[in-house]
Image (tube, rainbow, N blue to C red):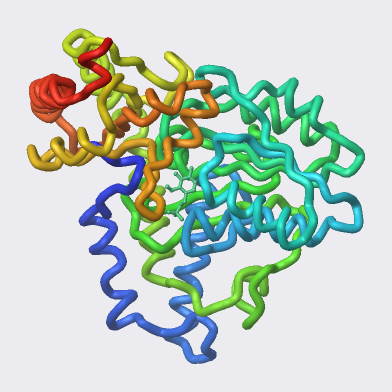
Amino acid sequence: MVYLDYNATTPCLPEVVEEMKRWHTELFFNPSSIYSPSQEVKKVVEDARKKIAGFLDALPEEIIFTSGGTESANIALTGSAFAMKDKGNHIITSSIEHHAVLNTCKFLEKQFGFRVTYLPVDRYGIIDPEDVKKALTEKTILISIMAANNEIGTIEPIEEIGKIAKESGITFHCDGVQVAGKIPVSVKKLNVDFFSISAHKFYGPKGIGALYIRKGTRFKPIMHGGHQEKGLRPGTENVPGIIGMAKACEISKNLMAEDASREKILRDELENNLVEKIPEIQINGHPEKRLYNTLNLCVKYVEGESMLLHLDFEGICASSGSACTSGSLEPSHVLLALGIPPEVAHGSLRFSLGRANTMADIEKTCEVLPKIVENLRKMSPFWDKK
Ligand code: PLP
């Protein structure tokens, strides 16, 4: 099998699984209990918090554990919108955010009367910080912009947007799910108030993530229950997950530079080869300001889903930008926001590389995909009439 869908999820490293094991079995204790084995578990959770804080250049007390990127974004957006509704009701985000952010914004609009500005992007998917500035009103309480886009890999000017937010006194959430573990992050340098991460995107376990909340940020908990995570995110801690995420952070920190240079070589080879071998394809995302592992392309006159099925048949796992909703194929909102016509956006493919990929994987994909495209185009009435 050739796995080229690391932006969707990554395999949990054996070292991480190993580290997690005994916290499921012999050290299963609830960290909130009074007896000494529980106190040991509590200490290990706090050590993990320190490691994760270090990974993001934050303080341990600024980290809360969540179930992943979606929950972190929900807590940050809803929690700060609720806390600041006396100050205003306007939120700024972008049209290319992950649904974790977009659908939370829609929920706040529909259910609670917040007003949301969805900023446009340029043809590479870049958000102009000037547009953020222009969108600010007296009622703006929150900005949410992603660090890098999951479909096209474009990296956003977060530091500049953070500076604008800071100068204007507006809370700033950054969805950092696709950058954590891929590029070094300093939440201080980025000027963010909230930063969401998810362990399964960087070789950690699924169902665990973290939210950085800068000290002093106004925010109301959206879940109610026990005192865990200072009452900000109640519920018995996912101890094995927390320990696994800390281990994955440690390993990513050490391997990040090596991953980056190796995966970029492979990604560029894949890109150059496909461009050379397949006529009428276009590369999406920024040529340079792009995650080193991500390649998104549109193959004209062919459906993305058909290519994926054929790739799967050949043992290659990739994804398309489009989401299949109740039988109707919707083109990706990200590609449409770049100004790509729907009929072209339908032919999108995303390859996202990771640590286990080799040049043989790239060679196989470059051998297989051009043939698939050629065959599908033979059947396409649009290719015929071209
Ligand atoms: N944000 C981005 C940019 C993502 O790519 C993802 C996952 O695909 C999420 C948020 C959601 O993360 P999780 O799957 O941990 O809920």
Q: Compare residues 106 and 130 and report the one nearer the observer.
A: 106
Q: Answer with the quarter of the image where residue 27 lies.
A: bottom left
Q: Residue at x 47, y 58 (%)?
A: 68
Above or below — where is 375 with respect to 96?
above
Work out whether 193 lies above or below 286.
below
**Along the horizontal axis of the image, is 160 left or right of 354?**
right
Residue lying at 34% horizontally and 54% vertically, measured from the top left: 204
The C terminus lies in which quarter of the figure?
top left
Who is closer to the viewer here, 12 or 84? 84
Q: Residue at x 49, y 33 (%)?
A: 334
User: For this rendering, which residue is in front, 383 or 356?
Assistant: 383
Can I make out residue 18 in this image? yes
Quarter holding residue 86: bottom right
Name the quarter where the N terminus is drawn: top left
Measuring 42% from the left and 72% from the top, which residue is drawn there? 239
Residue 157 horizontal side relative to residue 293, left or right: right
**In this rendering, position of residue 303 left or right of residue 157:** left
Single out the residue that lies furthest toward the bottom.
35
Residue 209: give x, y in percent of width and height: 48, 57
Query: Relative to 47, does residue 262 appear above or below in the rendering?
Result: above
Percent coordinates x, y for residue 78 in the rendering: 69, 59
How many discs appear? 0
Q: In this view of the protein, can residue 366 be seen by the observer?
A: no
Q: Position of residue 31 (x, y in %)?
A: 49, 80
Horizontal and vertical percent for residue 185? 53, 36
